[in-house]
Image (cartoon, helix red, strand yellow):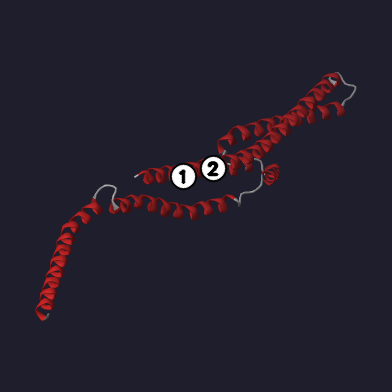
Amino acid sequence: MTELLNGAVKSSTGLIRAASTLLMVLFLGFAPLSGSALAAPGGMMSVAASSEPVQDALLARADQEPAAAQTVSAESTRQSPSKVALISAVLPGYGQIYNHSAWKLPIYYGLLVLFASNAIDDGNKYDKYSKLYSADPSGPDAATNLSNRESYQKRRNNQLIWLVLTHLVGIADAYVDAHLFEFDKNTERGSGQASANMESTTLLGFTRKF
């Protein structure tokens, strides 16, 4: 009986050793395969590498958001179109400078100076012939002085009308430009946001594919 038990123990010990040896061989054989699977295209290392562009894009977008917020806050401090027009009524040309349209100033100021100088010149001549007519209303030159006085009076009034119209056009131009300036900025900001969203969507879709 004792011999049978010793034989059974020896046989079971041999089976355990054989099983452990087989497990060791299997482990050593599959370990290189698992490492190559991680490094192969489509493996876990590839997935980790493909996720890096997504992380970079998200970090870049997070960095851009504070800059965009600062841009919006800076633009929110712009004066309203009505205020720009009101200041332009007192200071001709202010709206053109404020709306970054200073190239219009030579034309605008040139017309203002032209009509103002003509009005002053015609006004001086009106005063001259008015005094001559008042000094001798029944003299030989009275009819000529009266005709010249009325003529220069009409010309002076016309120049003043053109002067006022030019000033009103400058105010209207400043008002419209202020509206268009805000519209252009909003359009550029919307286009940039749409482009950024499209790039992020494309990047995510491309990475997800692999």
Residue closest to the far front: 1
| Image quadrant in which you'd find residue 147 | top right
Residue 124 visible in this rendered orientation of the protein:
no
Disc 1 to disc 2: CB gap under 8 Å: no
Q: Considering depth in this image, is 26 or 192 the residue closer to the camera?
A: 26
Q: Considering depth in this image, is 12 or 85 the residue closer to the camera?
A: 12
| Image quadrant in which you'd find residue 106 | top right
Residue designated by label 2: 190
Amino acid under label 1? Answer: Ala
Quadrant where the N terminus is found in the figure: bottom left
**Residue at position x 51%, y 51% in the image:** 68
- Residue 185 location, x and y as percent? 56, 42
Q: Considering depth in this image, is 94 or 173 the residue closer to the camera?
A: 173
Q: In the rendered view, would you say 98 is above or below 35? A: above
Amino acid under label 2? Answer: Gly
**Residue at position x 19%, y 59% in the image:** 31
- Residue 115 location, x and y as percent? 69, 30
Q: Secondary structure at mark 1?
A: helix
Per the model, the C-alpha gap separating discs 1 and 2 is: 10 Å
- Residue 180 location, x and y as percent? 61, 38
Q: In the rendered view, would you say 179 is above or below 161? A: below
Q: Considering depth in this image, is 148 or 207 the residue closer to the camera?
A: 207
Quadrant where the C terminus is found in the figure: top left
**Residue at position x 24%, y 52% in the image:** 37
Q: Could you say which disc has been placed on residue 207 in the image? A: none
Q: Secondary structure at mark 2?
A: helix
Query: Which circle's residue, 1 or 2, is located before the other in the chain?
Result: 2
Judge left or right: residue 134 versus residue 205.
right
Residue designated by label 1: 196
